[in-house]
Image (cartoon, grey):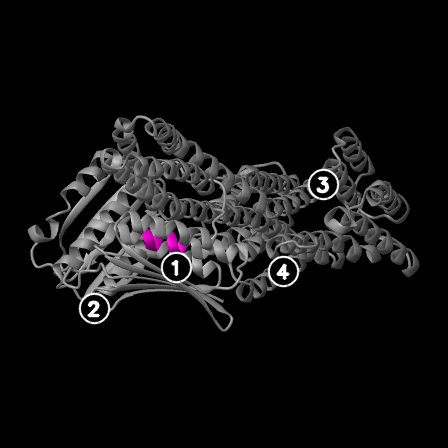
Amino acid sequence: MAGAVPGARSARWVVGVVLASFAGVYVLAAPSRTEGPVQAGAAIVLVLAVLLAQFVRVVPRWRTRRALTWSLPAQAAAAYTGVVAFGTSAGILGFVLGSLLLAGARPAAACVLASAALAGAPYGGTRADVTITCLLTGLVVYGLVRLADRADDVAAARLPLTVAAVERERLRIAAELDEGLGDGLRAVSAGSRRALDRPAEIADVLAVARRSLNRARTAAADLRSMSLAPEVAAARALLEAADVRAEVREGHREPLGPAGALLATVLREAVTDVVRAGSARTCLIATSERDGVVGLRVVNDGVRTAERGADGLEEAAERVRAAGGAFSAGLGEDGRFAVEAAVAAGERPVSLPDRTAYRLSLALLAAVLAGFSVKGLLAVPWGPLWPAAAAGLAVISAVQLLWAGRGRPRWWPPVLAVLSFAPVAVFGKAWVGVAGFLAGTFLVGLPAWAAVPLVAASMAAVGLAARTLGLGTAAVVNHVISTLVTGLVVYGLVRLARLVRDLRAAGEELARAATVQERLRAARDLHDLLGHSLAAILLKCELARRLAGADPGRARKELAEVVDMAEQARGDLRAATGGDAELALDAEAASARSVLTAAGVEVETVLGHPDLDARTSAVLGTVLREAVTNVLRHSAATRSTIATGQDGGAVWLVVENDGLDPEAPRTAPGAGIGNLTTRLAAAGGTLSARADGKGCFRLEARIG
């Protein structure tokens, strides 16, 4: 199939090999069932025609409406001609039976099965044997093709499933944010309009704006913390900045949801304590997930007493325990201090379970095992040994199903080998065919370099056993080839089911990753876009409140700007829940100058950038917003410079301010710098943020 992923393509190869091996049995039997090379050749051609018609349903690009229309009648004609005119075993009608089952024609399939029973079996066989062979062949054909189709469907559905998962997450985020932040922004806009004529209401607008800003920051933190991986990365960066060698071992799946938020809190507190103590040289951060429980372990070598290490972790411990989780902190036998927390993962934000294909595979394998067991029991004379034979075949079938379905203990292949060959001395030719299941076990459970020689050895052992029992050459060849075919059937059913399972898991993982990215994107937009807008609104409202008595005209002007900002913030909210914001660097530079001037910061702007495309302008505008927000929140700046320009093929933006306290202790970096680094990297750019040690802070972004 064009564009099919490797797993889906390999599924078609597995089906082709198994079906070709089925047909090979009839090809090799043709010389012994016909008189003369001409008739043998004609029988072989008919068998190949049956196989070719079957491949029309196996190879997707052959599966046109016209081909499907003629393939089934042609296959039936070739199969029945071979049986009636050239003595081909009626078991080949199983291909026709399988095609009819795939076409949904069950009544016609029942008629084919009945005709196989009526055709009988030459060479000492029984009608029951031929009927079972036909039925098993049909079921295997049906099952293999259906499983291969399922592999194609799963591979093709991965992108739509991923898009759907992202869309669900986007709608969920939009509903949550609009209920709180959307209402708040509408209240700010309406309140600011009323306050234009009633300055006393500015205080109410201030309160709403302050609550909205807190909600935006909390929502951004919650969205970010529900995915533990970004928190682990931030913790690692903080440790390395403090000269602590960090080792990270991630063993959980994202996204986590509320469990991630809880464990992120524990991680932040634990790592903050490590940095605050300042005595650690190494720190291990490990996550795990088992049986629906997500675990976090933070181990460092800088704490000397358990009491000192647990100091400051009480609140995090209470939150974990309140959620039904487990928390512990103490010194280990190696003298290192360990913080451990475990929380139930709960319902996954992305869960796409699908066990249909695997159940179909195991059901078909059970039917094949039952069919072969019945065929073997038909050859065992009724008597005292018959119950023993039935019990032995039941044990082999059960072990084979357990091997395929739940696990593969190393002792099972030797047990199956003994059960496959030892009873031959008692039951004779009735037991020779059992070795096929052993071949399937080797193919399913061992690498090719080990499986192929063992399968060849099994086939040789079957041939030797058949010859020892006095069977003729044709029967010996039939048993040897049947061993391979049975092994390939077992391998094909289990292998295809695992392919579907793996493809499904890959699709689920892709959807999870996309959901995490969507959640982080929303968190970045809330922090970078809406956070700036709300901070600017809060500043303008505060300024208007102070000016209301002294300069009413100026106060109304500031409130008018608040109305515009609130509308812009609502656009930012829509962007945070649905896509990129429509920002422009020039407009953001003008807004930044207005906001900083209102805050009492002297601003110098030197804009020398060329005409920018929309994406570059939006990214640099976002960087400028975050830089201005940092000036307002994290500094006591009196002067700031905003400059842009072009250097070769790169466009740059520099924002400097003098509000950094060189004596202030080093603190953990906020989310803003990380968000901006991610945005710029996606646009092919870089970000640097550094202090000069004299109270000035410089942020530079370059794209190109």
What element does badge 4 sit on? helix
Residue 272: percent from the left, percent from the top? 19, 54
Taking the magenta stretch, the answer to whether it contains residue 625 is: yes
Which mark is nearer the camera, 4 or 3?
A: 3
- Structural distance between the alpha carbons of marks 1 and 4: 62 Å
**Which segment is the magenta one?**
623-629
Instruction: Choose mark 1 or mark 3, whichever is in front.
Output: 1
Q: Which residue is mark 2?
A: 693
**Circle nearer the N terminus (1, 4):** 4
**Within the magenta stretch, is there residue 311?**
no
Q: Left or right: where does residue 566 sit relative to residue 456? A: left
* Disc 2, SS: loop
In the image shown, does 550 or 147 lie closer to the viewer? 550
Please name whichever residue, 17 or 184, is drawn nearer the observer in this view of the structure. Answer: 184
- Of the residues shown, which amino acid type is indicated by label 3? Gly
Image marks 1 and 3: residues in contact by CB distance under 8 Å = no
Is disc 1 placed on a helix, strand or loop? Answer: helix
**Majority SS type along the magenta span:** helix
Would you say the residues marked 4 and 3 are in contact, meaning their CB atoms lie under 8 Å apart? no
The residue indicated by pointer 3 is 138
- At x 24%, y 53%, the residue is 634
Q: Against 479, is 294 above or below?
A: above
**Residue shown at the point (70%, 44%) measured from the top left:** 141
- For the residues labelled 1 and 3, the Cα–Cα distance comes to 59 Å
User: Which residue corresponds to mark 1?
Assistant: 677
